[in-house]
Image: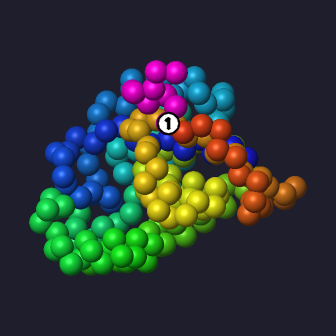
């Protein structure tokens, strides 16, 4: 099973603002889709997060994309839309101390994000698919399937409007196997990709 993990275009939001589940607009998806379309095999189904920054790109890539709530970015709860500098330092320190399990007030943990993203991929039943989603979702999937330590996968650089290709092993029934994942490439087709 091949997963084409696509990050949405750059959001139209000022620097230093906390956003995850916040539904904000992004740059025009049409040039991004034009760069990425040649990287997707013809007929590849496209599943998107329902947030507009992903949904608009999915619609530019495929005539009938589907949406899955489980592909949304992490929910930062009360932090959404606030400047990072105005979030209490003690809460940011608590998050840094337990990146996987800390829950921002009214939000969700990275472990919760990972569980729902993995459930979404598991429901694909071994079919190749393009997922138009967010950096957090892509990182938790790569971290899990490539068995990377959290301090590595939580910092993976993921360009806006790029595709990462991950191949997963499955059995004859389409059930994903815990070993055998191969990362073919990271960040292809992004605006900064010169290859």
Judged from the image, the secondary structure of the residue bearing numbered disc 1 is strand
The answer to whether residue 71 is seen in the rendering is no
Q: Magenta includes 52?
A: no
**x, y percentage for residue 119?**
60, 65
Residue shown at the point (46%, 21%) measured from the top left? 194
Mark 1 crowd level (few <14, some 14–19, many ≥20, 10 Å Cα):
many
The answer to whether residue 150 is seen in the rendering is yes
The residue range painted magenta reads 187-195
**x, y percentage for residue 22?**
28, 57
**x, y percentage for residue 185?**
60, 37
Residue shown at the point (64%, 56%) measured from the top left? 146
138 over 90 or under it: above or below: above
**Left or right for 10, reference 165:** left
Residue 24 versus residue 139: which sits nearer the camera? 139
Residue 184 versus residue 171: which sits nearer the camera? 184
82 over 156 or under it: above or below: below
Query: Which quadrant would residue 176 be assigned to in this image?
Result: bottom right
Residue under circle 1?
Answer: 187
Query: Which quadrant would residue 13 be assigned to in this image?
Result: top left
**x, y percentage for residue 110?**
44, 69
Q: Magenta includes 191?
A: yes
Give the prevailing secondary structure in the magenta stretch. Answer: loop
**Left or right for 86, reference 75:** left
Residue 32 versus residue 157: which sits nearer the camera? 157
């Amino acid at each position: 099973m091949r997963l084409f993990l696509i990050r949405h275009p750059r959001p139209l939001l000022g620097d230093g603002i906390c956003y995850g589940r916040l539904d904000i607009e992004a740059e025009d998806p049409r040039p991004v889709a034009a760069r990425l379309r040649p990287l997707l095999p013809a007929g590849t189904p496209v599943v998107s997060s329902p947030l507009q920054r992903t949904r608009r790109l999915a619609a530019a890539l495929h005539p009938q994309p589907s949406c899955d709530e489980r592909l949304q970015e992490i929910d930062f709860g009360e932090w959404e839309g606030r400047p990072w500098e105005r979030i209490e330092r003690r809460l940011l320190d608590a998050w840094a101390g337990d990146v996987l399990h800390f829950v921002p007030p009214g939000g969700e943990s990275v472990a919760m994000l990972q569980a729902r993203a993995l459930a979404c991929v598991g429901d694909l039943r071994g079919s190749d698919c393009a997922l138009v989603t967010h950096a957090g979702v892509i990182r938790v999937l790569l971290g899990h399937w490539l068995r990377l330590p959290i301090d590595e996968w939580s910092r993976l650089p993921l360009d806006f409007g790029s595709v990462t290709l991950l191949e997963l092993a499955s059995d004859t029934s389409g059930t994903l196997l815990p070993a055998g994942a191969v990362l073919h490439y990271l960040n292809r087709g992004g605006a900064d990709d010169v290859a």
